[in-house]
């Protein structure tokens, strides 16, 4: 997709939610709301979500699969944006939910997700996790290891529908921290042990094995890797249910390329029909590709330091976006709502770490203290990994739709920071 040209060549609107535009005054508008108006009410930093565009995308994702394979269910991977409001939004548009811990299950249920459309994951499920999944009556519990088998057998009173997570022995071409389909991964049963674990499950009366689950990694742009995973599953015993996980990559900067959902669904379903059959139940678990593009983060510029490098420091950073520090993920920030000469800068955060950098060598409209700066494609994993480094208060989540904004998650308060402290000095 081509970048914006002309006076805002520094601002690539193709990275923002569809429909994002500049109004007559040159202000950035997301979900019909001027970003400046939203942050005037809710402050910075703040996560803004284009609610209407995300709803449309959730519907399109489900339709892309069901039109090609009617027995499909798209499960939103809630770990990518673990908010009851966001989970509830995707559920209301027909998606199921993928949860990986008791807390995510609590959020999903609070958001109105149907337990019969929830799949419960986790490589280290506790008794509490298993008990919560059983009490809720989730669609499937994904068995990751033999300890899961023992716990379900001990805690269940009626047979539990389960899937077995297996390693398809596919080394995905992605960051090493996002590779999950190889035999050395902490997730799933290694390829050489699958037959034995299946036999063990079948000896347990409280486990009802329906099928297999495989997830090869995250941020994947090469669709042949998903096809390879399907082919690897076909070499195992056949089942009636296959969960192919998620992992589809997205565009973070203008030079990125990523398959669209229609192409992804076409290739995956064709591989399933070719290798596994046309009558199986097919599950997929998009997280990043469901929500990433539909969220942006808004900051205020706090300081501009010019020297050997120009450092533009904002009022957030690794407290609200750990993707850069953990994965080296590139982003494309922009100063919004005004034009001017461009200056190559490093955008850095306010936290006391040299690694607290949001982007390096980016062209910004010559920055000034007080400017608004936005970072697009922050709808996935940024809220997930937000934290209290330097006792920062985690930002709010604001839904924007049809020119109206509404608070989905409020900003943390200092009282929230102290709420769990038990040895506070009596100040009365």
Image (spheres, rainbow, N blue to C red):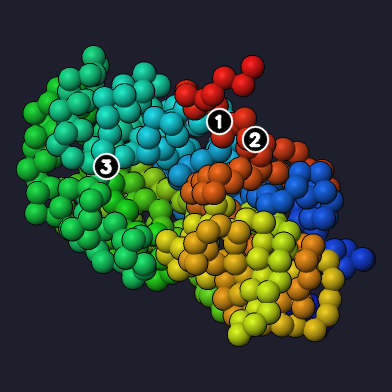
**Front disc: 1 or 3:** 1
In the rendered view, does 271 fall on the left or right side of 89? Answer: left
Point out the residue furthest to the right here. Answer: 24
Q: Secondary structure at mark 3?
A: loop
Who's the residue at 7% across and 43% down the image?
Answer: 196
In the rendered view, does 322 fall on the left or right side of 208? Answer: right
Q: Secondary structure at mark 2?
A: loop
Task: Residue 10: give x, y in percent of width and height.
Answer: 72, 78
**Front disc: 2 or 3:** 2
**Residue highlighted by disc 1:** 418
Residue 231 vertical placement versus 54 (above, below):
below
Sequence-first tag of 2 and 3: 3
In three-dimensional space, the C-alpha distance between marks 1 and 2, rounded to whole angstroms, equals 9 Å
Residue 35 vertical placement versus 77 (above, below):
below
Who's the residue at 63% across and 35% down the image?
Answer: 414
Sequence-first tag of 1 and 2: 2
In three-dimensional space, the C-alpha distance between marks 1 and 3, rounded to whole angstroms, equals 32 Å
The one of 383 and 170 positioned closer to us in this rendering:
383
**Residue highlighted by disc 2:** 413
Who's the residue at 64% across and 17% down the image?
Answer: 428
Query: On the image, which quarter does residue 328 sit in?
Result: bottom left
Asked whether residue 325 is in view, the answer is: yes
Query: In the image, which disc is placed on residue 123?
Result: 3
Who's the residue at 51% across and 40% down the image?
Answer: 82
Q: Is disc 3 surrounded by few (<14), some (14 to 19) or many (20+) residues within 10 Å?
A: some
Locate the N terminus and report the quarter of the image it occupies. bottom right
In the rendered view, does 235 fall on the left or right side of 336? Answer: left
């Amino acid at each position: 997709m081509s970048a914006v040209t002309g006076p805002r060549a520094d601002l690539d609107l193709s990275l923002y939610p569809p429909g994002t535009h500049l109004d007559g005054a040159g202000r950035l508008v997301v979900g019909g709301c001027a970003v400046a108006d939203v942050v005037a009410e809710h402050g910075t930093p703040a996560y803004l979500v284009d609610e209407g565009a995300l709803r449309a995308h959730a519907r399109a994702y489900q339709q892309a699969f069901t039109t090609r394979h009617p027995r499909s269910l798209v499960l939103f991977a809630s770990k990518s944006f673990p908010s009851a409001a966001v989970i509830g939004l995707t559920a209301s548009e027909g998606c199921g939910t993928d949860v990986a811990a008791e807390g995510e299950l609590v959020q999903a249920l609070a958001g109105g997700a149907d337990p019969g459309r929830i799949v419960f994951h986790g490589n280290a499920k506790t008794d509490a996790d298993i008990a919560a999944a059983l009490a809720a009556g989730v669609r499937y519990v994904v068995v990751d290891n033999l300890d899961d088998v023992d716990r379900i057998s001990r805690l269940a009173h009626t047979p539990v529908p389960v899937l077995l997570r297996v390693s398809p022995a596919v080394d995905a071409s992605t960051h090493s921290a996002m590779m999950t389909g190889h035999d050395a991964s902490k997730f799933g049963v290694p390829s050489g042990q699958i037959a034995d674990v299946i036999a063990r499950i079948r000896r347990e009366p409280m486990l009802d094995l329906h099928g297999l689950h495989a997830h090869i990694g995250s941020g994947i742009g090469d669709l042949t890797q998903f096809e390879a995973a399907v082919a690897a599953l076909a070499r195992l015993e056949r089942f009636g249910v296959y969960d192919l996980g998620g992992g589809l990559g997205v565009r973070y900067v203008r030079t990125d390329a990523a398959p669209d959902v229609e192409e992804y669904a076409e290739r995956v379903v064709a591989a399933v029909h070719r290798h596994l059959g046309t009558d199986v139940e097919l599950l997929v678990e998009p997280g990043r590709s469901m929500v990433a593009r539909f969220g942006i983060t808004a900051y205020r510029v706090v300081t501009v330091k010019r020297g050997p490098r120009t450092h533009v420091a904002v009022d957030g950073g690794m407290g609200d976006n750990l993707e850069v520090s953990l994965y080296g993920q590139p982003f494309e920030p922009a100063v919004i709502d005004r034009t001017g000469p461009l200056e190559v800068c490093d955008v850095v955060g306010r936290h006391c770490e040299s690694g607290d950098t949001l982007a390096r060598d980016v062209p910004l409209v010559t920055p000034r203290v007080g400017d608004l700066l936005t970072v697009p494609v922050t709808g996935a994993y940024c809220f997930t990994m937000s934290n209290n480094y330097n006792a920062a208060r985690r930002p709010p989540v604001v839904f924007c739709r049809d020119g109206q904004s509404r608070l989905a998650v409020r900003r943390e308060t200092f009282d929230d920071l102290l709420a769990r402290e038990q040895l506070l000095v009596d100040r009365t």
